[in-house]
């Protein structure tokens, strides 16, 4: 039996939260006029630290689980290419309670590649590898290795603070097939 569902079907309140966030942020995406004596400062590339609320589809029961994620990393020490990548270090925590799995703690490292820095919004692509600490009652639950890909945007609100929105996909193979999409929204802080 094949179960087909969409992100909106799985969690209607999550799609409403995403649309509300987008509606609140959309006025900030418009360019601001520059005053004659006040040049617009060049925006920084990406936030140095993000704290996010995350929904991840583990694929166990066809439902999303909720968790929190902290990610960040320094910019690379070289100036080429014109938009250098940023080291991406992620630590997440999920209480699962499904399929014999009690909790999942992804530890991931990769690179984020900014696509533009011409406005308050910095879209990026990212990819990396992960080690997934899994705990549960089932005898076939063991820690797993995997990879992730991400597409997101950092949105400057002013000063060093802003919002981060991201869609990611984790590919984890092993005793349990835990690969699936993850969606996150959170606040970011820049050390630049």
Image (cartoon, grey):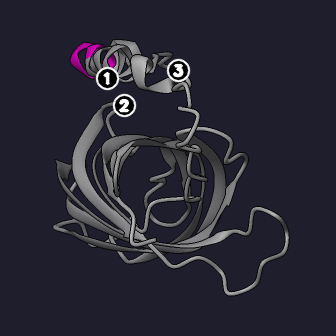
- For label 1, the crowd category at 10 Å Cα-Cα, with few meaning under 14, some 14 to 19 and many 20 or more, is some
According to the image, label 2 marks what residue? 62
**Which image quarter: residue 103?**
bottom left
- Give me the C-alpha separation between circle 3 and circle 1: 16 Å
Is residue 89 left or right of 117 when viewed as pictured? left
Above or below, 127 against 3 in this view is below
Q: Mark 3 — residue?
A: 30
Q: Which mark is residue 21?
A: 1
Span of residues in magenta: 12-16
Q: CA distance from mark 2 to mark 3?
A: 38 Å
Height in image: 158 above or below 27? below
Label 2 sits on a secondary structure element that is loop
The image shows residue 141, relative to residue 153, as above or below, that is below
Closer to the chain start, of discs 3 and 1, is 1
- Upstream in sequence: badge 1 or badge 2: 1
Q: CA distance from mark 1 to mark 2?
A: 25 Å
Report the front residue among 156 and 63: 156
Number of residues whose C-alpha sits closer than 10 Å to that of mark 2, classed few (under 14), some (14–19) or many (20 or more): some
Q: Is residue 190 magenta?
A: no
Residue 177, which numbered label? none
Q: Residue at x 56, y 32 (%)?
A: 34
Q: Position of residue 62 (x, y in %)?
A: 36, 31
| Place of residue 9 in the rendered image (x, y in percent of width and height, measured from the top left) | 36, 12
Relative side of 137 to 48, left or right: left
Q: Nearer the viewer, residue 115 or 39?
A: 39
Q: Are marks 2 and 3 in contact (CB under 8 Å)?
A: no
Residue 91's spot in the image, x, y percent? 34, 70
Q: Secondary structure at mark 3?
A: loop
Q: Please state the horizontal and vertical placement of residue 168, each as a whole percent of the image.
A: 53, 46
Magenta stretch mostly in which secondary structure?
Answer: helix
């Amino acid at each position: 039996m094949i179960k087909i569902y969409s992100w909106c079907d799985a969690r209607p309140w999550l799609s409403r939260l995403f649309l509300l966030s987008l509606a609140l942020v959309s006025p900030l995406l418009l360019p601001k006029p520059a005053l004659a004596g006040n040049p617009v400062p060049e925006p920084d590339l990406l936030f140095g630290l993000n704290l996010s609320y995350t929904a991840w589809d583990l694929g166990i029961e066809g439902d999303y689980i909720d968790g929190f994620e902290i990610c960040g990393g320094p910019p690379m020490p070289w100036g080429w290419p014109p938009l250098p990548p940023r080291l991406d270090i992620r630590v997440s925590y999920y209480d699962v309670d499904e399929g014999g799995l009690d909790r999942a703690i992804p530890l991931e490292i990769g690179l984020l590649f900014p696509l533009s820095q011409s406005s308050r919004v910095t879209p990026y692509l990212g990819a990396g590898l992960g080690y997934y600490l899994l705990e549960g009652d089932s005898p076939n639950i063991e820690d797993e290795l995997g990879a992730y890909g991400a597409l997101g945007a950092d949105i400057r609100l002013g000063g060093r603070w802003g919002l981060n929105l991201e869609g990611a996909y984790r590919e984890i193979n092993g005793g349990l097939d835990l690969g699936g999409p993850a969606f996150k929204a959170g606040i970011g802080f820049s050390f630049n």
